[in-house]
Image: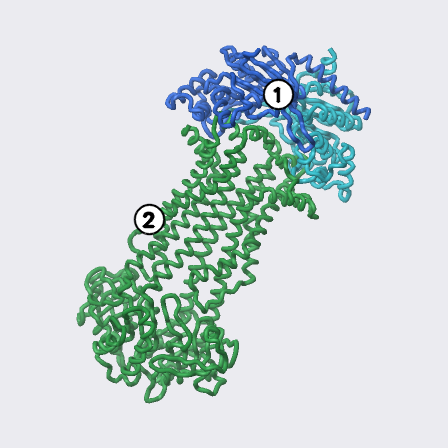
Amino acid sequence: MIKTRTRKIWGDILSRKGRTALVSFSIFIGVLGVVTLFSMGDILVSRLEQDIQEDKLAMTKLGLTTSERATELPDARDFLTMVEAQPGVAKAEGQIISQFYFREPDSDDFDQGSLIAYFTPLTEVELEPPQLIEGDYPVSGTKQLAVERRMADTYDLKVGDTLVLRMVSQAGEGLSIPEENWTVSGIVFQPYAIVDNVNMSTTIFTTFEDAQYISGITGFTTLFVRYTDFATAQAEVSNLTGVIAGDTPHIPYYSLVFDPEQNVQIGEAANISSVLGLLGIVALVVSGFLVVNVVNSIVVEQKRQIGVMKSLGASGWDNVVIYAGIALGYGLLGVVPGVLLGIPAGFFAAKGMASNMNTVIDKFEFSPSSIIMGILIGLAVPILAALIPVYNGSRVKILDAMTDLGIDSSYGKGFLARLIKRLPLPATVRQGISNVSQKKGRLAFTMLTLAIAAGAFMGIFALFSSIDSVLNKTFDTYNVEILIQPDQQQDFNTVRQLIEDNIEGIQFVQPHNGLSVEVEGYDSAEGGADYGVSVEGYDPDAPDSVFVLDLQDGVQLSESDNPNSIIITAGIADALKKGVGDSVVITGAGNSREMTIVGISTFPFNSLWVRWDVLAEFGGYTLNGQPAARNLLVKLDKEDPTAAETADVIEDINELLLAHGITATYGNFPELIEEITTLVRVFQIIFNITAGLIALVGALGLLTAISMSVFERQKEIGVMRSIGAGSMAVATQFLTEGLIVGVLAWSIGLPISYGLSQLIAAALEMGDAFKLTYPILAPIVGIIGMLIITAMASLYPSISASRKTVSDILRYQ
Amino acid sequence: MADAYINIRNLFKIYQTPAGPLSVLRGINLDIAKGDFVALVGPSGSGKTTLLNMLTGIDTPTEGDITVGGINITRAKPHKLTKWRARNVGIVFQFFQLLPTISVADNVIAPMDFANVWKSGERRDHALQLLEYFGIRDQANKTPTMLSGGQQQRVALARALANNPPLVIGDEPTGNLDRMSARNVFNAFRRLSERGTTVIIVTHDRELVKEVPKVYEINDGLIGQTTLEAAARRHTQELLTLRHMQVLS
Amino acid sequence: MNLNGKQALINLEQVRKVYRTKAGPLEVLKGVDFQVGEGEFVAVVGPSGSGKSTLINMITGIDRPTQGEVYVANQRLTRMSENRVARWRGRNVGVVFQFFQLLPTLTVMENVMMPMNYVGTFTGRRRQRAMELLERVDLPDVADKYPSQISGGQQQRAAIARALANDPKLIVGDEPTGNLDTVSAGLIFALFEELVSQGTSIVMVTHDRDLAGQVPHVVEVRDGCIVPEVDMRLVSSN
């Protein structure tokens, strides 16, 4: 008994190779998607969870600078001891993180990278330590450094190799900058995302003393603090910044608070992979609709065979086994290659995404749970999908099977039939509509598939156009290309003069201060992190202001005489329920002040703007008793310069300033914009590919549904041709059918797309600043795409229908 | 003929159609003895296929009874009927109705598998013997579509005989074959009846039907044992009357 | 066939049809010569599988010969594309099937209008003409019903009305009474005779030898060849 069923199952699967290929391919796509995307997420998350140890995470990270009072910095150890004595502090660690310049011995050009040094010897670091992978940690005074593994990969560095470093600490007026050969003593891996602007593929580690020697920076630039718990960290951070600002020459210009239990890196990886994985499951479920249709069509097609088998003694159960077996066969044909390909695809996807998640996947890894999930869902979906048609098939009566004449002989009784009869349409179109209405069950699945696909596409379109508009708004606000942050305090006017006199193509140089503060009554925490609210201090009176603020209410700072004027974003204004004329209290760097709101900006990320000199005074950043500018903002003459053009100018400025003994960190805005845009595009592509897979499965479903329609109505086509219908008339009918399905699916897809874009935005934790808009272009692009897809999917069956010669059809009987 | 193998008593079949009830069988009474070779003839739509379907139990009468080998098949439950049919009736269809996706031999094995007759190790041998008997053993591993119509019908015959049924039924078994093949298949049916199998066929073939010992004509749901010529005459007469009426109206 | 001086509407010259099957070539028509004159009523008889359906498929252009020529109403069908044949057939030949084959999702009226829609005839008065045709087959009452709502005999009469839609010279029937009871079959046959009396040619395949006996010309096909004509009236009155 088992033998005949098995033979029939495989015989059927193999005899219709095209159809088998379609169904198995769609299951394959779904399984591949599920296994790949979940594996990617699982591999990344488990890698991160393995590398990032919760008890070693800093809860607070402070950015430190020094003011003119810092003629004599306190002893670093004393400073850390003082910090650790603060209430709730469990452990403190100080670093120097600075720019450094290096080249390989056989190269002429210097590259720029990050130099990181912990105060504690690397073997004993307790907060966010790097791991030694190869060789040894560097030893002070021996010109040794350790490279991050991603830098070792990028530059193909081995233990014992030499790097040439520029000793910028020894730069000075009229002096040439000496170069020294340093040896790679070891390769380390830093799994923790130290601070945002560190690029691990150009990062080295040295001892604290050597870092001072190379950079010329004597004190800490950052401070990591771990509190007894997160709540204490949140409560105590302002006390800590106050103590540092008040009792030491250090000025904490930013303070970040992190919840170690909600690590941002892990959270992001998990979010992205679960959102993508869910889309993969949707693709798989959608391929289940195709299985429903195909098994249904097999049962319809083989009605006569079912009758014959029953007349040979086959029971209903035999037929259930045969047709469910066919579904299972399709499932196996899709699952096996899907899993086999999904395993390496998941690995490579994880490897590719690793740099975005600040980690490294080096050796081959796979995710057993994702594989099991892929197999189970991949097999369950077709079997579950096949249940109803299989059940119907098992109930086919021999008599019905043997006397079926092919044409539905009961049309005309239903409500829809009567409704369609009244429609004032040409008979051919009405016939198309009738056909759609008759195959409601089957087309419902196809329609749902296409609706989900259309919804996913339009939703993702809406989401990313919202992201784009947020980014554009952000980029447009910065009317500047270069940020210069000198390592030591400098007189702004001297440096500006130096640049303006020596560098060509500079439109202006303006002063800037930045500080992160707390706003009274406003909770800036998002996810597991609190970055505070950043205050931008700039010169609003300059003829060309660096900030081009778009205000929804109030006036620009330049129009206000009150020095304590502040512009806040709409997001903060809404949260505080305050408007123009109200006052707001900001606290930072050990100081608090009541400011008057003069304008509300539409800037999407929550921020504050004040006059640069007011901020300097507020943060205690002074020179000769006068408020000082910590940063210089440079705008080039050239309109929209590229990242590379900007980098060239930065290099010129750097050489110029080094020649005058000034070391600095540089920000390249066009490059930053490029990086952010690229990152967004990568995600956009991943999302669109996933939506594309759903659409592909949907199109395959429509193709199958219309092909089935053609097959089932061969006799009808024959009759139409016999009474004079040309190829066009036949093709038009099936095309009409496809397009009707497409348009209906699109209209169902509209609300889906809206909900989905909200859902994805929420799942990705886009934050308060992100406002989802639904552009009118989304449904327009959607309907055009849908018409193209449905036209293409119904074209092949339409043409094959129109090509059917009557004799082919009649010979079939 | 109370001891007949098949007893058909007072059989009615009425279909409900949109245009009102349609009587397809209108009180059929017929006895068929074991080993009889019977042909049912009659015009299309006369009810002969419906009668055949009643005999195999795939259609149920509106009224009346059929017993086959002492079992009242009109009163049996569907799943019991399936088992009964698998072991007791071999059916041969006009369009062969072989399962297209499995081999010829597997088609013959299928009824043995479904009914669980023969030990599973013996089924293939038995199928090959049957194919040998019909002279198509060399086709055993091909799929049905690779065979000619005559060959396919011989496979269908082999399949019908797989479980050694006492009754074989053919619904126009030669209807789709050329003369030579039709003759071959017909001879095979005749040999079956000579070996003691009861054979009932429906046919349109006037030449072959002459060689069938018992011919029953079904006309508008009624039965009569007759010769074709007599039937033709009566039928023509009816039609002429009808046309006459039509012209008058 | 003797045309008795009438002009040939249908002319098949040495038509051979060979189907390629997986079991090898199958010769269904073995060089058939066949003529039908205008206004003739011809029945094609023969056992299943003899080639009679293939023969009439040649006449309607539904199938093409492997060799030989087919002329119908002065058209050489063997040289026309499938698409052109479909249009030509719609205009010049009415086809009636055994199982009626009305399009199930269109009303009876729309079914009758379809051939006019397809080939673009009777623009503006299609509905009126369809109604006239339905009156002619005595079915004006069911014009707005769907095929499934009327009886088999009514469906076949509607199918004949549809076949007449473009006023064809030729009606071809493939067992048009094969699925009807004797009363309905008689009505259909009477309708055919009436059409013939008005000058339409009819070629029909039938299994029903009694019905064939009523047709003036009977052509018997056997194993792909036409056997000499028999007058069934002589046989039956014998």
Name above or below for residue B16 compared with residue A786. above
Picture quarter with the C terminus of chain A: top right
Name above or below for residue C234 compared with residue A173. above
Q: Residues within 10 Å of mark 2 (few under 14, many from 20)?
A: some
Residue A1, picture quadrant: top left
Query: Colour in which chain A is shown?
Result: green
Q: Are marks 1 and 2 in contact (CB under 8 Å)?
A: no
Going by the numbered disc 1, the residue's amino acid type is Leu
Would residue A115 appear left or right of B64 to someone viewing this image? left
Dot 1: element: strand
Query: Colour in which chain C is shown?
Result: cyan
Identify the residue at horizontal 63%, vertical 30% (top origin). Answer: C63
Dot 2: element: helix
- Which residue was labeled with disc 1? B11
Would residue A375 appear left or right of B90 to someone viewing this image? left
Which numbered marker is on residue A235? none
Would residue A101 appear left or right of C152 to someone viewing this image? left
Spatial separation of the CA atoms under disc 1 and disc 2: 66 Å
Going by the numbered disc 2, the residue's amino acid type is Pro
The x and y percentages for residue A109 are 31, 69
